[in-house]
Image (cartoon, helix red, strand yellow):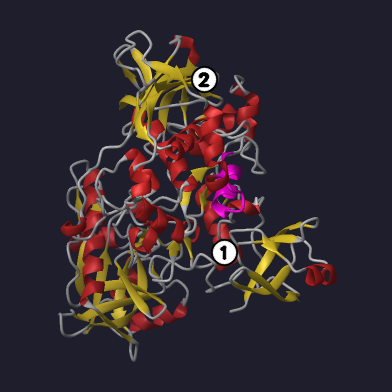
Amino acid sequence: MAKKGKILEVDIENKKIRIEREPNWIQVGKAVFNRENLKAGEFIEYEIKGANFDFKRKLEDKPDFNNKKDNYGNKFGNSQAKSNLSKPTVKEMYYPYNFVSLGNPETIKKEREEGRSEEYKNKQRYSGKLVCTLTNLTPIFTSGNKKEDGIKNHFKEEFLYGNGKYIIPASTLKGEIRNIIEVITTSCIKNVSDERLEKRETESLKSIGLIRRKPTDETSGLIVEADRIKINRENVLAKLKEFSFQDRKGKINLKEGFYKIKVNSKIRNYIFKDKNSPKIDDLKIYEDCCNGNEEAILWISSNIQNKRYEKILIPRKNGRTFQFSKQDYEDLTYLISQRKKREEKAGNSKFYLKEIEENEPVILKEENGKINLTFSEFPRLRFKLSPYDLIPEPFRACSNKDKLCFACKLFGTTGNDNAQDTETKMNSLAGKIYFSDLILEKAIENEFFDITLKPLGEPHPSMTSFYLKNGSYNDENATIRGRKFYWHHSDKIKAGKNYKIYEKSIVSEKKEKFNSTIRALKPGNKFNFEISFKNLTDEELGVLIYALELEEDLLHKVGKAKALGFGSSKITIEEFFLNSEEKYSNFFNPYINGDKQKFISIIKEKYLNLNRKEIKELKIILKNTNNLDFSKSPFPEVTNKKGELNSLNWFIKMKKDYEENFILPEITDY
Ligand SMILES: [Zn+2]
């Protein structure tokens, strides 16, 4: 079948080209090469049959890649425009993280089989240790003791301290190194949640209805559409005894809940008078239209952010009806229970809702013929699929201890928590490498500084357009984009010890619930640690050494506040010891010195091939410099009408301006 693709590079001398998403350089026939004058950046149609490249034609424009599969069988990325709307520029999209592609699913399948082969079992093995240092080039922080700091729910976090030393725990660095090794060796993905996510809507939902019939296993439920009119809390409801009460401090509060009330036909005049936002603002109007014999529901919900209105719902004459399933109803009940939990956490033990019964209101959103029910106009909705559901099958966590991916063989596994049934659940398997904690070499107190950081949380807990290719968590065709990595902030690396220059761009003016004050370590400090290993093959040892030292201009990112530019670090292997053959006979010198380069050269060809998209992406995102400008703020921010500058406003604006084209570019786009 003919494919379409972009030429990334042309090797004129050897008449070879590299096409986006093709794993290898492609040899072009001499006649075609001389005739077509192929250039990087051009789009072509072509076919690959075995080892032969069959050139079809040049394409005028970028083809529509949507819903086509790449040569790995994965769905194409989202960076292709879906509509005629313009796309955000890379400059607008300086987001702190991005995703490295998962790689070729055939590679992980092969690796899992090879682990069982005699050849793998009989390979020469190496044991020994690596004595290393880690130097932080930007501030670094790992979280130790925390205590409330002046303001309720605002915490001051100390740098982790144990046994008289400042430390970075072994598990923190191990996680970072494993992440990198997973990319290099096309390994499985660990610890992706199988909880279905919720998202917060930013636009008010249009449809509201009343449940007429609850669903059962056999029959669907029924909702009838309703008209709504807002009713003023302070000027109307607070003056009506049946809906309000006076608390101990003498303040008038409203009683949350659903109330059956009677209205007359005049209320429709008020609704039609102001089609966009009908409201009842004074008691006289309420008395005028809220008596009669038509049934309606007054809905008083929680008083969040001092809102001014509640609402009355009246079944619409000749309105639409909606059917919904038992699963839809259970999702709604789940959302209510999650909200109740959040309310309890915030100290409100009496959230008014448990389940929504017949003749009570729901808010609904239709999406691709599916219905999402909720109970708030700016609600959280529950997605139909979990992130785990969207990992392409070959990359799901290893579930058979005889068939492990490269990373699981090396690091071991903590068991497959994501396996759906207990049959395939795997007991944890010990790894072959052991990290020590990282210990700060010279603990000088004035090398630490206190800083109140901007909130690290994302404005949207589940930015589907960022985490997924092709659609949302409601869409079975969607897949996760890959493994998450944070960009280095070149301005901060360049500043070196002089962190005061950029301090302002990451500091929060106020101490709040949403941010914290931390005691971070200044740039330019050194930690000592060791990694001991046993029974590694030459490839496993080579990959480990490479993943630690990387390359001259590539850096690690370790610890907390990565989004704010913290934790950019360089690891150096100071000493490399291999167990000597006569370990037991020579008590004083059990080790010999190993040769790092020898092991790296073994893996170079197989694992660090830049023709692999994910290797190219990894090297770009680990690089100490890049095209992203984080010097003003770590997150893109926009000022809204009220003059508030924040990241949520940026999301709202971008979503409005670009609609479905508001997607995170791929790493190679930067
Ligand atoms: Zn694995």
| 10 Å crowding of disc 2: few (<14), some (14-19), many (20+) | many
Kind of residue indicated by mark 1: Lys
| 10 Å crowding of disc 1: few (<14), some (14-19), many (20+) | few
Label 1: state its secondary structure.
Answer: helix
Image position of 12 (left or right of 374)? right
In the picture shown, does residue 122 fall above or below 400? above
Of residues 269 and 19, the one drawn nearer to the viewer in this rendering = 19
What range of the chain is rendered magenta? 608-622
Residue linked to disc 2? 522
Q: Tell me if I can see residue 440 in this picture.
A: yes
Of residues 511 and 270, the one drawn nearer to the viewer in this rendering = 511
Residue 392 location in percent, x, y? 40, 62
Residue linked to disc 1? 656
In the picture shown, does residue 7 fall above or below 628? below
Image position of 662 (left or right of 264)? right
In the picture shown, does residue 318 fall above or below 181? below
